[in-house]
Each structure stands twice: as structure tokens, then as C-alpha cells.
Amino acid sequence: MKYKILSGVVVLSLIVSLGANAYFYKSFVDSQAQRNNLLSQTIADWVRGMDVGGYLLRNATTNAVMAEADSVFMSMQLTGEALVVNDYQTVYLYMALAAGDVAENLFPYCVGSDLKYINQTAIEMFAVLCAKIQNLTSLFDIVELTHLEGANPMHLLEERGLVDSIIANCTDVRNYSAEISNLSPKFQ
């Protein structure tokens, strides 16, 4: 009788333990899926924002329009930094740096409270930078990122073999924006 009670307690303990483990495992999986969804949505927001900044940049002829574009790139830098904070990956760091460098390098074209027209050579360079930004953002499949519930976005990028291309394109955007920053004179 003593052994039956002891066996019953052991079996009951095992059942409770298995139930608790299953509950905590499901909670962990659900929280990881939510985290992945948030990361995917943040990447998609960064891609859309970079495209908007590129569009504004492509059509910029005055310091006022450049200020709008610069503001968008500063916001995308913060979005990229949020990715780094939440899931440190080298590719996220390059995404943040690309947006930040564009914002910093274009800032000299935003100065002044009086309306100033930008040098034609710089305007032509803006179009090239816009194309480089589009080359970068076209590497991301926003639909796939945002519609695959719970999928780790880094795994998706790695499976597609895009990580090195994204880093290379981010570096290209950063370097070309530095060339634009060095152009003188900046205004007509």
C-alpha cells in the first residue's frame, strides 16, 4: 500500500511536471514568434522608409526638400538601431549605419532658413544615390517578411543568401553619400 501511494505521487508529479514544461515551452515559442513578427515588421518599416527618403531625395532641388529627406533618413537610422538593440545582427548594424550616414552626409544640403537651390551636379548625384538605395531595398521581400507568421527574419535573409549583398549595398550607399557630402559648392 505504501508503495502504491508513493508510485501514485511520483506519477502525479511527473504529469504535473510535463504539463508545466509544456505550458512554459508554448509560452516561450509564442513569445519568440511575437518577437520575430516585430523584427520583421520593423525591417519592413525600414525598407519602406528608405524608399520614401530615396523618393524625396530624387526630387530634391532645394534645401527645404532636403530637410524632409534628411528627417526620413534620421528616422530610419533610429529604426535600424531598434533592430540592433532587439536582436544584434551585423546586417542590422549596417542598415542603421547606412541610414545614419545618409542623414549625416546630406545634412549640409539642409542648412539655412532661406530657400536655396542645390547645385545641379549634386542633384544628379542624388538620383544615383536614390538608385543605390533602391538596389538595397529591393533585396528585401516585404511580403515574405510580414506574412510568414513567427519566422525569424534573419533566417529568411540567410536562407536567401542576401546578408552579404545587403551589407555590400549598405556600404555602397554609405560611401556614395560621403561623396555627395564632399561636393562643393553645394548650392547654386
Image (cartoon, rainbow, N blue to C red):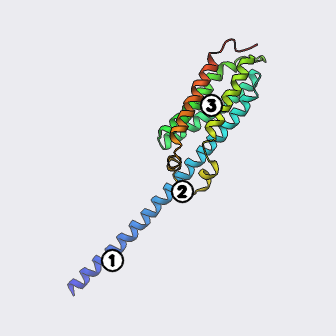
Q: Which one is in front in this view, the residue at disc 3 or the one at disc 1?
A: 3
Disc 3 versus disc 1: distance between alpha carbons? Answer: 58 Å
Q: Amino acid at mark 2?
A: Gly
- Is 6 drawn above or below residue 157 in the view shown? below
Give the camera-side residue of 127 and 60: 127
Q: Pointer 3: what residue?
A: 74
Assign a secondary structure to mark 1.
helix
Q: Amino acid at mark 3?
A: Met
Q: Residue at x 51, y 41 (%)?
A: 163
Q: Residue 82's spot in the image, x, y percent?
A: 54, 40
Residue 4, image quadrant: bottom left
Q: Nearer the viewer, mark 3 or mark 2?
A: 2
Tell me where residue 175 sits by quadrant: top right
Q: Please tell me the numbered disc located at residue 12.
A: 1
Q: Is residue 104 visible?
A: no
Lower position in the chain sequence, tag 3 or tag 1: 1
**Numbered badge on residue 49:** none
